[in-house]
Image (cartoon, rainbow, N blue to C red):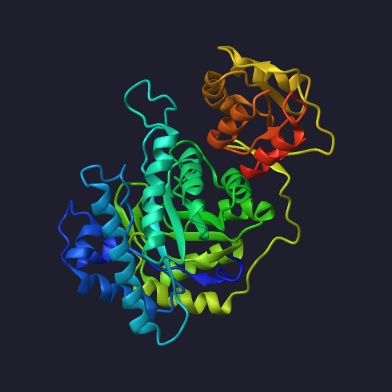
Amino acid sequence: METLLQPPLLLDGAAATAYRKAGMPAGAVPAFWALEHPDMAGDLVRRYTAAGCDVLYAPTFGLSPLSRPERSADELRDANRRLLLLTRRSAEKEAAGRRVLIAGDLAGVGLPIDAENRDGHGISFDRLVDSYAVQAAALKEGGADLLVCETLTGLSEARAALLACRETGLPVLLSLTVDREGEARTGARLLPAVITMQSLGAAAVGLNCSFGPIGMAEWLEDALPYAAVPLLAKPAASFPGEDGRMVSLDPTHFAEEAERLLAAGASLLGGCCGAGPEHLALLRGLLDRHPIVASPEIDTQAAAGEREAFFLSDDLEPSKPLICDSELADSLIEAEEEANVALVHIACREDIDTLIAASPMSRLPIAINTDSAGLLEETLRRYPGRLLVDTMSEEDTALLEEIAARYGAISF
């Protein structure tokens, strides 16, 4: 993985924007349009390759069972594999022996995640993992060099995507889409996402789309001192302005703004909505001239929730065990008065739902205590962040530590 992804790397630009210019009608699904117009889709790949892109995203965005429920699993598997092959063959025609990586592209689904699906509106975490797993397997079968999970709307979604994709053994890149305040739809922010996703095995973490390059630099700078993996930036070149009107950045202006992202620590750089081969050609020159900016010292000993990172002191002082009941949110707030870690006891599966719902109220890192290895595994699998694990339990300590390591948690 380390040999495959050696920054700096130039990612490609938008596909749907170019397809619309080539005649794709409104409402069409870009992936299926690309299959119906392979010459046009292949030409775009060749143009991105000629612009100097190192990583080309196959146009498989949204080809998962949850995103396209009207299509059968066999149809989706075939479409993913065919688009991978189309992208690779088109790139190889232009690359002239230069190494170009082909990425399978998975999209955020933007649906609320409800563990038990009790309200009829959400989807279960396990169902989301299964949907991503179907697409990830098809993309690996199609010959992808790596997988990209982009336009993610929160850490539960990112976690589901990464857990599914890492089963393929391929490197996985993840990128959130955030608003002008730096928040994804669920409130997730880049810094806690980096802390959480790198501990779970992501090869790179960052942002895509997100109202263009203006403002992205701030979030990258925040994350850089805690990023043990490369930071990714794939900003849009066309986005709604504060007055609601669309703002388009020409290639020169886009490159000028993108230079701030490199200075902030991004080492994987590309373009999203509105960015075409002309934009990427200028980014190629920019990337070749700009040195990689790395933090002189990286601190990875941190826990995280969706909205906040928690930096651990040398001396952890857990609270008394907090019970997962209707007053857990208040208990998490009160724990600040006596401790620097909120210790939560998990006694049954319902406690996991209670913890996830109440956890945004905590201003302390959260540690889990349980006497069940199964409950610990489910908690760590689903929690949208990075937890600590109290290994003082009736369960075998080595087993608890192994489970914690598998899900990127910190044992103490």
Q: Residue at x 21, y 70 (%)?
A: 38
User: How many labels, in total?
Assistant: 0
**Location of residue 389 in the rendering, given as x and y in whole percent from the top left corner:** 70, 33
Q: Is residue 78 visible?
A: yes
The residue positioned farthest toward the top in the image shown: 326
> For residue 112, what is the image quadrant?
top left
Q: Residue at x 63, y 70 (%)?
A: 292
**Location of residue 92 in the rendering, given as x and y in whole percent from the top left corner:** 37, 80
Q: Residue at x 45, y 66 (%)?
A: 270
> For residue 279, what is the image quadrant?
bottom left
Q: Is residue 3 left or right of residue 37?
A: right
**Vertical order, 160 against 139 (above or below):** above
**Location of residue 87 in the rendering, given as x and y in whole percent from the top left corner:** 33, 71
Is 114 in front, or is 217? Answer: 114
Is 372 in front, or is 273? Answer: 372
Q: Quadrant of the C terminus?
A: top right
Is 193 in front, or is 99? Answer: 99
**Vertical order, 268 against 315 (above or below):** below
